[in-house]
């Protein structure tokens, strides 16, 4: 697992670096207001992808890991589902824009069209990455994202050298990168596609049924992370959304670290029993992730004005308010992966739903009064409460909090592996 984690960490590092450079360029070229509109459009695309995921990002690797003969059928069904689901999502987004344009402020019809154009590729790539994860082929799995980020960055630099870029140009670049990533994912699975056809009656139903078990939770988790940016854009304006988007980007870039561990944990939990693996990983994540979050505070205070410009100075305070939530999200990642495979307890599902509903309701009430600072504060409170609920449930499975809390042995393991 350590080798796979290192490979995934390397891929994520390249991805975050490229996306970071792209974000810096866009933020400087468009300014806070333009960055806010772009961030809202990009968040909309990610939300639509999450809505259309159908839980296949978990069920695809689960079934691919357990039944290699079913992988070809999984790939073909995934491509078909991506086309159908993206068509439904696009129709729904167009209906919302037509019937309630105030729900998507600043996002015009052209921006919406460019955002929706990437949906088939985004969904298909997500589904196919699940198959690669189930095969435990971590190099091509990570290269899919690297190819997307690198191709998008190169396209943006070329566009910047030719014309003055605007929001439409950036959205076109993002959409193009997703299709390049899809082409690479299909190429990586060419041996599966060219292999013998093996009938798997009822496979689609099995994929969707298993995916449904985690779909609600994964959807609520994602909406809790992403929806507040759209609320900021709608209730306090594009400039505030631009400031908050930078703080959110820094947080999301850091959260890649525990996500890397969770990605490699999923197929191993699928083929093992008990809680020892999950508990051991969680203890190491607590130590490593806690240190990273602590060190990120002075780094953000120095780095945000330096990289994004003086006009984004408000993003520093927003990030510091978001930091407790960032810590909680990173720790929750290992626990959610455990329950994605083992089955999500209804009480924990209810905790996520309650956090989402409460967060949205309080944002609607407090954003007009407190301003943009309400969003990171409310998010940090929501994530922290959900983390407490998950730790309590997991400690009950492991026989107490002793199995969850790190000790000196875990510190020695971390130091030894760091060498």
Image (tube, helix red, strand yellow):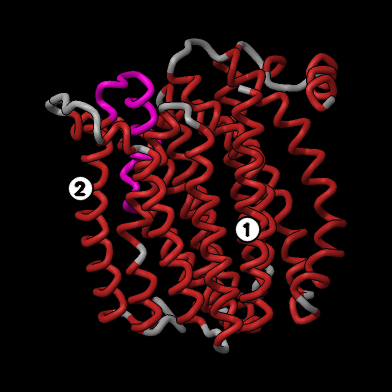
Is residue 342 highlighted in magenta?
Answer: no
Residue at x 29%, y 74% (from the top left corner): 96
Compare residues 347 and 223 and report the one nearer the observer.
223
**Horizontal relation, residue 89 to residue 307: left or right:** left
Badge 1 or badge 2: first in the primary sequence: 2
Compare residues 357 and 150 and report the one nearer the observer.
150
The relative height of residue 97 versus residue 87 in the rendered view (above or below) is below
Instruction: Write the start and end of the magenta stretch as one range.
Output: 50-71
The relative height of residue 127 versus residue 417 in the rendered view (above or below) is below
Q: Quadrant of residue 415?
A: top right
Q: Which residue is mark 1?
A: 378
Query: Is most of the magenta stretch helix, strand or loop?
Result: helix
**Horizontal relation, residue 191 to residue 135: left or right:** left
Residue 152, position as x, y percentages in the image: 52, 65
Quadrant occupied by the C terminus: top right
- Secondary structure of the residue carrying tag 2 is helix
Q: Which mark is residue 80?
A: 2
Quadrant occupied by the N terminus: top right
The relative height of residue 127 versus residue 308 in the rendered view (above or below) is above
Q: Quadrant of residue 113?
A: bottom left
**Horizontal relation, residue 282 to residue 174: left or right:** right
Is residue 63 highlighted in magenta?
Answer: yes
**Horizontal relation, residue 413 to residue 259: left or right:** right
Q: How many marks?
A: 2
- Secondary structure of the residue carrying tag 1 is helix
Compare residues 357 and 160 and report the one nearer the observer.
160
């Amino acid at each position: 697992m350590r080798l796979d984690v290192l490979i995934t960490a390397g891929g994520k590092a390249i991805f975050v670096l490229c996306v970071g450079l792209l974000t810096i360029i866009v933020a400087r070229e468009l300014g806070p207001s333009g960055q806010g509109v772009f961030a809202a459009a990009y968040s909309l695309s990610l939300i639509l992808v999450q809505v259309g995921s159908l839980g296949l990002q978990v069920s695809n690797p689960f079934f691919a890991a357990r039944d290699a003969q079913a992988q070809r059928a999984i790939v073909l069904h995934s491509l078909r589902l991506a086309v159908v689901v993206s068509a439904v999502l696009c129709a729904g987004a167009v209906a919302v824009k037509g019937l309630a344009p105030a729900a998507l402020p600043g996002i015009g019809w052209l921006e919406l069209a460019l955002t929706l154009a990437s949906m088939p590729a985004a969904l298909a790539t997500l589904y196919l990455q699940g198959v690669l994860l189930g095969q435990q082929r971590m190099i091509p799995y990570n290269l899919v994202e690297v190819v997307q980020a690198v191709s998008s960055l190169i396209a943006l630099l070329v566009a910047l050298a030719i014309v003055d870029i605007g929001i439409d140009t950036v959205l076109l670049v993002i959409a193009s990168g997703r299709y390049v990533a899809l082409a690479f994912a299909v190429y990586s699975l060419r041996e599966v596609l060219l292999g013998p056809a093996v009938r798997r009656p009822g496979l689609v139903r099995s994929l969707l049924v298993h995916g449904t078990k985690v779909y609600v939770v994964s959807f609520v988790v994602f909406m809790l992370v992403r929806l507040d940016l759209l609320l900021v854009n709608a209730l306090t304006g594009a400039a505030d959304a631009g400031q908050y988007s930078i703080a959110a980007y820094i947080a999301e870039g850091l959260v890649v670290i525990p996500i890397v561990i969770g990605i490699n944990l999923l197929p191993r939990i699928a083929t093992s029993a008990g809680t020892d693996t999950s508990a051991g990983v969680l203890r190491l994540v607590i130590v490593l992730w806690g240190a990273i979050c602590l060190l990120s505070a002075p780094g953000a205070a120095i780095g945000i004005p330096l990289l994004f410009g003086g006009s984004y100075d408000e993003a520093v305070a927003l990030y510091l308010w978001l930091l407790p939530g960032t810590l909680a999200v990173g720790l929750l990642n290992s626990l959610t992966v455990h329950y994605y495979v083992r089955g999500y307890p209804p009480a924990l599902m209810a905790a996520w739903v309650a956090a989402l509903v409460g967060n949205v309701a309080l944002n609607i009430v407090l954003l007009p009064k407190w301003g943009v600072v309400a969003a990171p504060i409310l998010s940090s409170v929501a994530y922290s409460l959900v983390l407490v609920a998950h730790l309590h449930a997991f400690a009950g499975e492991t026989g107490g909090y002793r199995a969850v809390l790190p000790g000196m042995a875990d510190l020695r393991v971390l130091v030894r592996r760091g060498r």
